[in-house]
Image (tube, rainbow, N blue to C red):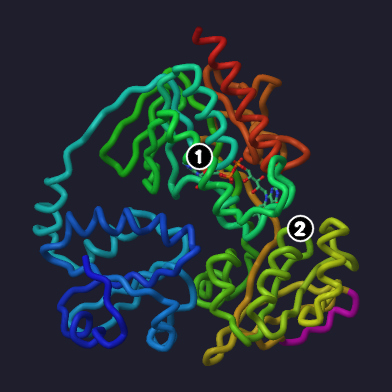
Amino acid sequence: MKEISSEEFEKEVINGGKVVLDFYSTECPPCEAVAPKFEGLAKLYGKDIKFVKMFRQQNKPLAEKLGVKSSPTLLFFDNGVQLETSLSGGIKRSDIINQLDNMLAPERVKEIKSQIKPAVSEFDVIILGAGPGGLTAGLYLCQSKINTVLIDIALPGGQVSTTHEVSNYPGFIDPQPGYMLSHNMSEQTKLCGTSYKVAVDVSKIDLDKKEVIIDEFETIRAKKIIIATGTSPNLMGIPGERELKGKGISYCATCDAKYYDDKEVVVIGGGNSAVEEADFISKFASKITMVHQFDTYTANKQAQEKLFANPKISTLFEHEPRAFVKEGNKIITEVENLKTKTRSKLISDGVFVFIGWKPNVELFKNKLELDKWGYIKTNEDMQTSMPDIYAVGDVISKKYRQITTAVADGTIAAIAIAKEMD
Ligand SMILES: Cc1cc2nc3c(=O)[nH]c(=O)nc-3n(C[C@H](O)[C@H](O)[C@H](O)COP(=O)(O)OP(=O)(O)OC[C@H]3O[C@@H](n4cnc5c(N)ncnc54)[C@H](O)[C@@H]3O)c2cc1C
């Protein structure tokens, strides 16, 4: 795999035959999660398709010309022609494989796939999700000499790695960059000896058999499972959003805010995430318009005060977005005034959406007892409705979702499991 610059684009990509190009950025957890998948697939498909990557921050004009609006973005080229499909954001290994397979003859795809050998491994405990909840459970289990594997679809760290600053995690006098806090948590657990299988696709979870299949060929079995899969950002669910996701609409300020230097941005939401992230985006953007459905923010007072003192940020209270449209390089956000029902248009260079979260329970939601919002119900030992299945952190039914509460849940589950397995 080769790292290239804009000057080499013509030679390496346009005249390069079949090519996949990864535009990545620094301080971008989804970019770091794609990198090992990209490297692994380069070994598998490398004879037929050229894998190249480009640093987006240093090649901004070319990235913009090719329509790259989010990091990471994978573009595919066949004999100089850019293919219609591009992938961006939290990219799955299987999505890259589908696109690569489409570029090759079916017989060749079969030959390539025949090189993959199935594997099976066994542990005492599988932890699904390596955010603060899962990492803490992993640390305590490891210190109890319980053979544990942490599985994550991204790199370790969870949502903390996409948070620019954390000021309320005890033990640090100064606010900590989120990625440093999550890096330290992860290193502590890894150094103890917990196994990691991260940046993988979780293809199947069988809670009855306590079996997880990753990347479609590796089966992992255990005696107990801890679910620590956290939450994902809610989408608005309005016209234009899916089409423009990663192409001007973003859900990760640490990943994309740096590309809005002196540009105008719309931020949707009014809770803690929206207010704190808007303040962070204002380090780059020249003007931010926030759109919030209520007449006051729901964020904490300290965050609100900081926002009101920020001259770059103004807010349309009691407004809701109704549609997104792209016109040239601009994103038009059509908003409705909830009082007067009149509609108007906001023209910006990009939109960030922070409107709450939904639990990551898709792969097992029919098996477990959930609350009415879809979060997993647990008892005081973090046990779910199924024997030997535990759940911790933001994915469980509880009032307050913070790093400290996820860490506490992970501790409780691990101690309860260690006592049971003793
Ligand atoms: C922008 C932002 C700012 C925040 N600021 C603060 C703050 O200042 N202070 C504070 O205390 N809290 C803050 N929070 C909340 C805090 O980040 C969460 O409460 C905490 O990360 C929850 O930890 P968790 O381990 O439960 O889940 P997460 O951190 O969400 O981690 C879940 C992990 O599970 C993985 N996963 C998802 N699905 C699967 C699957 N099917 N299989 C395997 N793995 C999977 C994910 O990739 C992820 O790594 C903030 C959150 C956001 C989004």
Q: How many marks?
A: 2
Residue at (63% x, 28% y) in the render: 369
The response on whether ligand 1 sits within 8 Å of label 2 is yes
The amino acid on which the numbered mark 1 sits, given as a three-letter code, is Gly
Residue at (22% x, 61% y) in the render: 101
Name the residue beneath numbered marker 2: 272
Residue at (75% x, 79% y) in the render: 289
Q: Residues within 10 Å of mark 2 (few under 14, many from 20)?
A: many
Classify residue 274 by image quadrant.
bottom right
Q: Nearer the viewer, residue 14 or 191?
A: 191
Q: Earlier in the sequence, mark 1 or mark 2?
A: 1
Residue 127 is left or right of residue 218, and the answer is: right
In the image, residue 59 lies at what x, y percent? 39, 82
Placement of 304 over or under 339, stated as above or below = above
Q: Which residue reaches farthest bottom? A: 328
Q: CA distance from mark 1 to mark 2?
A: 23 Å
In the image, residue 93 lies at what x, y percent? 34, 54
Q: Residues within 10 Å of mark 1 (few under 14, many from 20)?
A: many
Residue at (25% x, 77% y) in the render: 77
Name the residue beneath numbered marker 1: 129
In the image, residue 3 lies at what x, y percent? 27, 71
